[in-house]
Amino acid sequence: MTELSNLQFDAQHLWHPYSSVQNPPLLHEVVSAKGVYLTLADGRQIIDGMSSWWSAIHGYGHPRLNAAAKDQLDKMSHVMFGGLTHDPAVSLARRLIDITDDALQYVFLADSGSVSVEVAIKMAIQYWFAQGKTDKQKLLSLRSGYHGDTFGAMAVCDPVNGMHSQFAKVLPQHLFAAAPTCRDDDDWKDSDIAEMRTLIKANHDQLAAVIVEPMVQGAGGMRFYCARYLRELRTLCDQHNVLLIFDEIATGFGRTGHLFAYEAAAVVPDILCLGKALTGGYMTLAATLCQTRVAQGISADGQGVLMHGPTFMGNPLACRVACESIDVLIESDWQQQVLSIESQLTDELHGLTSHPSVKEVRVKGAIGVVELNQSLDGLMDWLPGFIVDQGVWIRPFRSMIYVMPPYIISTEQLTLLTNAIKAIVDKIEDSGKS
């Protein structure tokens, strides 16, 4: 009996993100990665325009991150965090506290971005419970938002256009306000915050927290909005005794041009969720930070303990690599790298604004988005193959073709990415005519 190839076995036995086993996705087997390149089993090298879903900000195979992982492996790859501690976890907490706002003084080390959101939700609800306000268990979020795939996180994703509508009957029912439309503070209209203001005023006795993705709504539609919205939201939360959670899993560690997106608005959340780029894309790790009043408030009744404790919490190997990734970032000229990427994406994608298939081109920091007038869902039988044929890896979704490249990408490599986007748009236009 002939043994199945990796791709054949995968098609018959493995699930991939948001995929069907009855209609397996077109796959490309990666055998190695270095810098901005993925090497495929057939020998082709392609530029990763996705940073492995926004996480590999330093590219692949970074020598300092490799060395940190190898050094930690020789000491211990894992030890339980219950009743024990270790230098990688403490060192990572030190770094996170140092690079975030002074108000954020407590760190919970989680397994993944979704789990960091779960922990943030628990923090908010437990905080009010310990204050004797046991009715404050609702959350308020933005439409077009995305916060993860676990049940607590799904419940604060967009309930209509999100990916989790079939779970509506079993998810907790929370509140949603219209997403802001302002792009810059100059575009500000008070109507942007009107529904949010109304919902907070009417429901503050039941609201534990508002949770938003600051400045950039990621997987919910790659939407950008202005800093003033966050300032207005902070004021509303303070006025009505509601906690504010920022989900910076996608935006953290420089992606928008600020180390953290909240810095653009000079607004500090009560609770901050981080993930993705935390380890430079080496392994899964996330963190939930909170202000002292939240951490101490959870135990205000003398009984409250934060009700979460994953088996792999504070994994030493992940924490050690995360420490090195943060050091590499802070010691680099990342601001100029991101600014250069932003400038080049703006220049090279601008011509697509007049393309008949294109609805809009958006750029913020090291994020470039081309939104089309049509959904791409019906094109995925051939589109991934066409993309790889351009020498790049881009993963479109809905009507969006977008890139979030590693910060180390060169101008020549980025031009190959933008040229590929143009070729994709032209090909989609041509396919619609045939």
Image: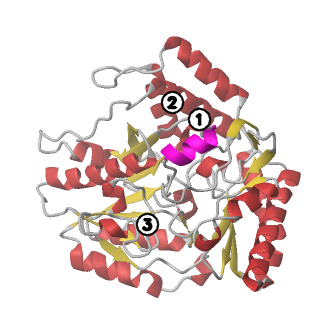
Q: Is residue 343 left or right of residue 311?
A: right
Residue shown at 80%/58% (left/top)? 417
Amino acid under disc 3: Met
Q: Which residues are magenta?
A: 5-14
* Location of residue 295 in the rendering, given as x and y in whole percent from the top left corner: 28, 44
Query: How many numbered marks appear?
Result: 3
Report the Cα–Cα distance between label 1 and label 2: 8 Å
Could you tell me what secondary structure mostly forms the magenta stretch?
helix
Pointer 1 local density, CA inside 10 Å: few below 14, some 14–19, many at least 20 = many
Q: Amino acid at mark 1?
A: Tyr
Q: Earlier in the sequence, mark 1 or mark 2?
A: 1
Nearer to us of marks 2 and 3 is 3
Q: Nearer the viewer, mark 1 or mark 3?
A: 3
| Residue lying at 39% horizontally and 84% vertically, measured from the top left | 194
Relative to 180, residue 205 above or below? above
Residue 336 rendering spot, x and y as whole percentages: 77, 51
- Proximity of marks 1 and 2: CB atoms separated by less than 8 Å: yes
Q: Quadrant of residue 283?
A: top right
Rounded to the nearest whole Å, what is the CA distance between mark 2 and mark 3? Answer: 29 Å
Q: Is residue 202 left or right of residue 390?
A: left
Q: Residue 67's image quarter?
A: top right
Q: Which residue is mark 1?
A: 282
**Most foreground residue, 114 or 5:** 5
What residue is shown with label 2?
318
**Real-space CA distance between mark 1 and mark 3, rounded to the nearest whole angstrom:** 26 Å
Residue 406 vertical position relative to residue 280 in the rendered view, above or below:
below
Which element type, helix, strand or loop, lies under badge 1? loop
Q: Which mark is residue 163?
A: 3
Residue type at the position of mark 2: Ala
Q: Is residue 96 visible?
A: yes
